Image: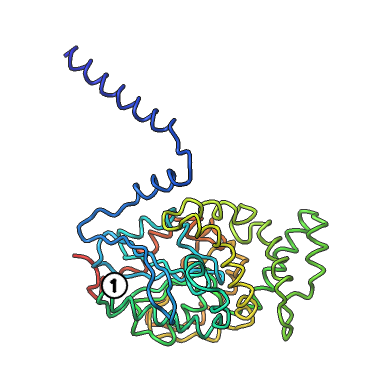
Amino acid sequence: MLKRSSRLCAALLAGLSITTSAAAAGPDSRAEAVNIIAGMRRIVTPQGIEQTRAVRIGGIAQWISVRGTDRRNPVLLFLHGGPGYVAMPTSWYFQRGWEEYFTVVQWDQRGAGKTYAANDPAQIAPTMTRARMLADAEEMVAFLRKEFGKDRIFVLGHSWGSSLGIQLAQRHPDWLHAYIGIGQVTDAMESERRGWRYTMDAARKDDNQDAIRELASIAPYAAPGKPLVLKDLYLQRKWLARYGGAVYGRTGFDAESAAAKLAPEYTDADLKTMWDGTEFSSSRMLTDVLAQDFSVYTTFRCPIVIFNGRHDYNVSASATAEWFDKVKAPAKQLVWFEDSAHEIFNEEPGKTLVSLVKYARPFAEKAGDVAP
């Protein structure tokens, strides 16, 4: 017994020394850190899929990552926000659990992320329109349905991506198991007005004279019939983020922005141009999309699932809830996230996964579109 105990102790000590040695050894570079993350999230199952590649969409190379433990599961296409605010480089943090229930496709849209880096901005600039972006989304859904042999897929639209997603649900309900909206854009200008009021109230409560003065300088903000100026929007967003209207309990997106540096799908060169792509896309499209009223879409022929952050003032959660009350669909579900603002999948990743499995996946299960 003593000899066996000694061997066990030696083994435990050996394991401890390996663990502490590995911990002390680094990582000493982005490459090492990325390799660690890539190793931990590597898909090893026989039916699994793990790809990062360019596909031809809208006449140009557009980059996607495709990940899932069983390609027979339903496909879920993520339409990122912005315009130009890619989700692929932070998906390593929030997405791994999804991949056990869905084949998840992250797509860097025209003018964004790896797609921005792969194309000449001068040639792409004239094509940066909502109509072209919606056509790209239609092509992407058609490509994925064919690639995976699916009659229907899930589309998840976040923020700007939700303006594309809601139109996809309107135009092509027969392509979708369901549409899932996060930070769902509805009446964009009313959302902006509510965001400004929230931010001004917070600044006054904080007696922040700089914020009060700057916010007052752009009043009346998002006034009806008045075009929204980009510099005014950026000023409003600066203080809205400072008071937790974008990420609950935080003063901005710094943590998420830093996390992008650890993206296995992104090269050093991709990271250098990532924020250039965000500026390129937003400067050409953001004020236009915020001039739209998507709340006119209230009747759908596919299920609608909305995840709503209780503290979201970046896209007004209250405006989204009011719109949802009017929605008519074969099935609909509004899920509140009490500890989130605009970045629900980063702020409450566990509840996001549970909610996708509970409220979305059953539509695929009913259709027989799941792995056995």
Residue beneath the point at 76% across and 53% down = 206
Do we see residue 310 in this rendering? no
Q: Nearer the viewer, residue 283 or 54?
A: 54
Which amino acid is tagged 1?
A: Ala
Residue 35 versus residue 215 in the image, above or below = above
Which residue reaches farthest top?
2
Do we see residue 357 in this rendering? yes
Q: Position of residue 55 (x, y in %)?
A: 37, 73
Q: Nearer the viewer, residue 119 or 221?
A: 119
Q: Position of residue 334 (x, y in %)?
A: 46, 70
Q: Position of residue 43 (x, y in %)?
A: 29, 54
Instruction: Determine which quarter of the picture holds residue 340.
Output: bottom right
Colour scheme of the rendered structure: rainbow
Q: Nearer the viewer, residue 4 or 60?
A: 60
221 lies left or right of 41: right
Q: Nearer the viewer, residue 353 or 24?
A: 24
Residue beneath the point at 43% across and 56% down = 94
Callout 1: SS: helix
Instruction: Determine which quarter of the picture holds residue 208.
Output: bottom right
Q: Which residue is denoted by mark 1 in the rendering?
A: 364
340 lies left or right of 60: right
Circle 1 packing at 10 Å, graded few (<14), some (14-19), many (20+), is many
Residue beneath the point at 44% across and 46% down = 31
Residue beneath the point at 55% across and 86% down = 296
Q: Position of residue 73 (x, y in %)?
A: 26, 67
